[in-house]
Image: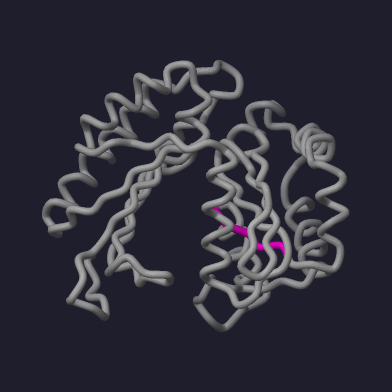
Amino acid sequence: MLTRGRFTVSPPVAIIDIGSNSVRLVVYEKLARSPTPIFNEKEMAGLGRNVAVTGELRPDATASALAALERFRILCDAMGVSDVRVIATAAARDAKNGADFIKAGEAACGRRIEVISGEREAYLSALGVVSGFSNPDGVVGDLGGGSLELVEVSGSGVGQGISLPLGVLSLQDRSGGSVKLAEKIVKTSLPAELIESMSGRNFYAVGGTWRALAKLHQRQTHYPLNVMQAYTLPTRNVVDFARLVERAQPLA
């Protein structure tokens, strides 16, 4: 549903994010530092499913993603949004048939698709935190379906980001669904120097996976507000909640 924004003097701008788990369209009222979203829709296409194992995008996932891109083109045309930026991340850049998908995707959405690197993805995530928080200090972690991007931020400064194949779908495929093996993969993949640099600093969680966990925590603690942006958890709470979630599921 289209929601009215605050400004009518500037044209709206849209972003289509082709991720490893979802394909999302967000329309903003105008290009600004902290724009107001007026339309938000996503399709859980699961492009990254099995890419870590087979090296290719699955036909059913690409069909779902292409159908979403065509629908998003129609929606943008209906809303009169001409400025549409389209980016693709881990699944499209890692898969052997990613280039074929991008070609079909450009035909479906009617726009050029930019496949961004993991480092670029980390940088853009960091810019979002710098724009949305006052004097941030810590590490930004953007967790998607195919990869995890980590990058330090300090005030308006952004460090050199890294991208690791630790996305939710990728990790599930590589571990065969084993929680114990997934934990081992994560522990051996995270750079020790980065973990040490986080001591006493904030961790800025970006991405749908973190949001899902935060929503679970809000419900568990009966948080009174339905607001996710800037939701804060002390480290002790995160550890206790992680143990609670672990006890709630069987280990393979």
Choose between 24 and 220: the one closer to the eye.
Answer: 24
Q: Is residue 252 visible?
A: no
Choose between 159 and 98: the one closer to the eye.
Answer: 159
**Residue lying farthest front?**
157
**Residue lying farthest bottom?**
224
Q: Is residue 205 left or right of residue 90?
A: right
Q: Position of residue 40 (x, y in %)?
A: 33, 59
Q: Is residue 244 left or right of residue 155?
A: right
Q: Position of residue 227 (x, y in %)?
A: 51, 76
Q: Position of residue 125 (x, y in %)?
A: 55, 55
| x 52%, y 69%: residue | 131
**Magenta residues, start to end:** 203-208
Q: Position of residue 240 (x, y in %)?
A: 81, 64
Q: Is residue 64 left or right of residue 149?
A: left
**Magenta span dominant secondary structure:** strand
| x 33%, y 43%: residue | 86
- Magenta stretch encompasses residue 55: no
Image vertical order of residue 147 relative to residue 242, above or below: above
